[in-house]
Amino acid sequence: MRVASWFWNLAVYVAASFLASLVVVGSEGTVTGLKVGLMLVVVATPIAIGRYAGARQSAAEAERLRVRESERLAIAQLRADQLAERERIAREVHDIVAHHVGAMVLRAGAARYAAPDGPVADALADIKETGHQVLEDLRGLLDVLRDPGGDAALLADPADVVTESAERMIAAGLLVDLDVDPALGEAPLVARASAARIVQEGLTNVLKHAGPGTAVRVGLAAGDGELLVEVSNGRPPTVREPLPSSGQGLAGMRERAKALGGTLSAGPDGGGWRLSVTLPYPKTKVTT
């Protein structure tokens, strides 16, 4: 028994010693100092052992609580540091890109009013609209980086992203054939969002390396727990000088696929280029 008051411990000890002496010594026995000492030791031993065992258990429990609390605080601090770093990076990316894109939008808008109607004016208007969309996407990305657990509904719908990307590339001169599986909505939002960004990057690469007039087929299909993305283009209509490329676009797409446990393959295909991505996901219907 764990008794907080030392008074009750002492009272129990005295009572136990008295009762034990009546049994062991007896009314006819002779009381000696040795017997009294032995009696005190016999009664005190289990009390001492119990107190020691209780103290060990209390110390062990306190240590376990301390370790758990330390781990919880360490995890909380790590997450706070990660969120702070994400916010810092997001702010720097936003400031750098927003500055240049904002300047591009202003110049395109000014040139739009000075240019006569025609392809040049249409191109400047498209640049201006694209710049505005980039700024909106940057703000949305900044919100997500600041609050990763926020509402995913605030992000653009992946189907709209794919459609807008195809329309912009058609306006830029590509001959885009878009084929989207109606069952695509069964895939999780994170898989569809990654697929949409991969399509964006794939179409951008086609426009950059093959040029306007190139026929491109974009296919998105879902089934058997996999989301399949394919961007393939034919031979460029004209010979183009190779454009400088850092290769970060393809590396970024491969990282997106790898993050979801998927695979990416890309390479020449009959004079053109073919990009194929597989993104696995659980076979459960997702409601958006």
Image: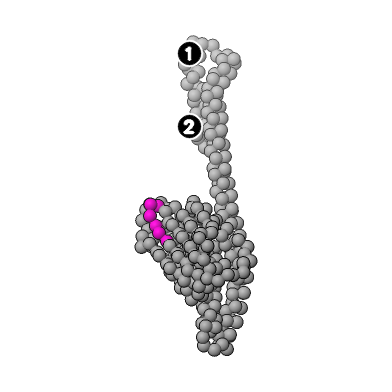
Residue 39 appears in the rendering? yes
* Residue range corresponding to the magenta coloring: 220-225
Cα separation between marks 1 and 2: 31 Å
User: Is 220 left or right of 121, judged from the image as shown?
Assistant: left
Give the labeled residue for mark 2. Answer: 1
Quadrant housing the C terminus: bottom left
- Of 248 and 120, nearer the camera is 120
If you read the primary sequence from the N terminus, does the residue marked by circle 1 or circle 2 appear first?
A: 2
Give the labeled residue for mark 1. Answer: 27
Q: Position of residue 126 (x, y in %)?
A: 52, 78
Q: Position of residue 87 (x, y in %)?
A: 58, 63
Residue type indicated by callout 2: Met
Q: Is residue 59 above or below residue 230?
A: above
Secondary structure category for the residue under label 2 = loop
Residue type indicated by callout 1: Ser
Look at the magenta stretch and give its main secondary structure: strand
In percent of the image, x 46 and y 54: which residue is there?
278
Q: Is residue 218 magenta?
A: no
